[in-house]
Amino acid sequence: MTTRRTSPDSGRATGQVAGLLLAAGGGRRLGGRPKALLTHRGRPLVEHAVRALRAGGCERVHVVLGARADEVRARAELADCVLVDNPDWEQGMGSSLRAGLASLAGTQVRAALVLLVDQPGIGPQAVARVLAAHAAREARDAPLQDAALLSAAYAGVRGHPVLFGVARWAGVAAAATGDRGARAYLKEHADAISLVECGDVAEAYDIDTEGDLGHLE
């Protein structure tokens, strides 16, 4: 894994939540077109996801790249993001989640808000709502902030973004294999998840197949 910063580490205050965008996939079911480079409203999809994180309240954003990473860096405007190269991206989303969490180690970040690049229907409102729920929880139970576990929900069904307190990162990374990402960890810790309903402000569809491309403009 290689971490490349487009700006210096700002070392912002303890308690900060970083946005962690997983954008390394090669788009196998899309004919080998990396999802980060799909065009949406005239710009690469990865830019829209970064803007959603920033506009939703994440001052620090780490972006995990893999397939055609050099082209993504050349075509997308990712200024002030921390770019993380995942050489093992072909192993699946789990490797990108591990790489992203590893890139946050040693920073003052206390929680990671994970978003996927292929869900353009999830915008800043959902990000802001999960962050607000985390802040409210932190105000009530500050000693428990490092073990925070929150997830956006759509009609009661868990989705993204998902927020992991720093105390959970090692467990999440250990369970992240193949294309399952954090799914196994979340299933095991289902009773600890605080669901934040976002179905009124976002749509949780994925861009996985040719048929899904109709969602893009």
Image (cartoon, rainbow, N blue to C red):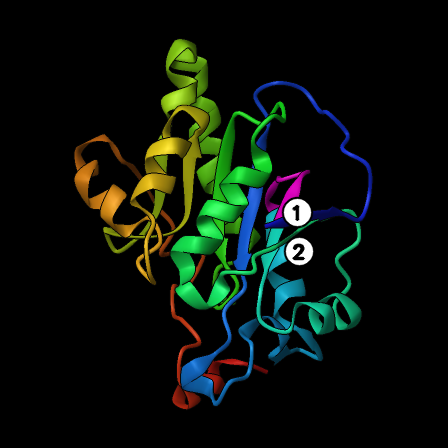
Name the amino acid type tagged 2.
Arg
Q: Nearer the viewer, residue 9 or 1?
A: 1
Q: Is the Cβ of the residue at disc 1 closer than 8 Å to that at disc 2?
A: yes
Answer yes or no: is residue 4 visible.
yes
Can you give x and y, in whole percent of width and height, for residue 204 in the image?
38, 63
Can you give x and y, in whole percent of width and height, for residue 11 in the image?
73, 25
Q: Nearer the viewer, residue 210 or 200?
A: 210
Which residues make up the magenta segment? Answer: 56-62
Q: Residues within 10 Å of mark 1 (few under 14, many from 20)?
A: some
Can you give x and y, in whole percent of width and height, for residue 144 in the image?
37, 15
Answer yes or no: is residue 126 visible.
no
Displayed quadrant of residue 18:
top right
In the rendered view, tell whether residue 15 sits above or below residue 86: above
Q: Nearer the viewer, residue 17 or 31?
A: 31
Q: In the image, what residue occupies the spot 53% across and 63% down? A: 117
Q: Would you name the residue on which mark 1 appears?
A: 54
Would residue 59 be counted in the magenta stretch? yes
Q: In the image, what residue occupies the spot 40% across and 24% down? A: 167
Q: In the image, what residue occupies the spot 67% across and 39% down? A: 60
Can you give x and y, in whole percent of width and height, for residue 13 in the image?
67, 19
| CA gap, disc 1 and disc 2 | 5 Å
Q: Would you name the residue on which mark 2 appears?
A: 51
Displayed quadrant of residue 201:
bottom left
Q: Nearer the viewer, residue 46 or 176?
A: 176
Q: Which quadrant does the C terminus fall into?
A: bottom right
In the rendered view, tell whether residue 177 sits above or below residue 33: above
In the rendered view, tell whether residue 90 sits above or below residue 155: below
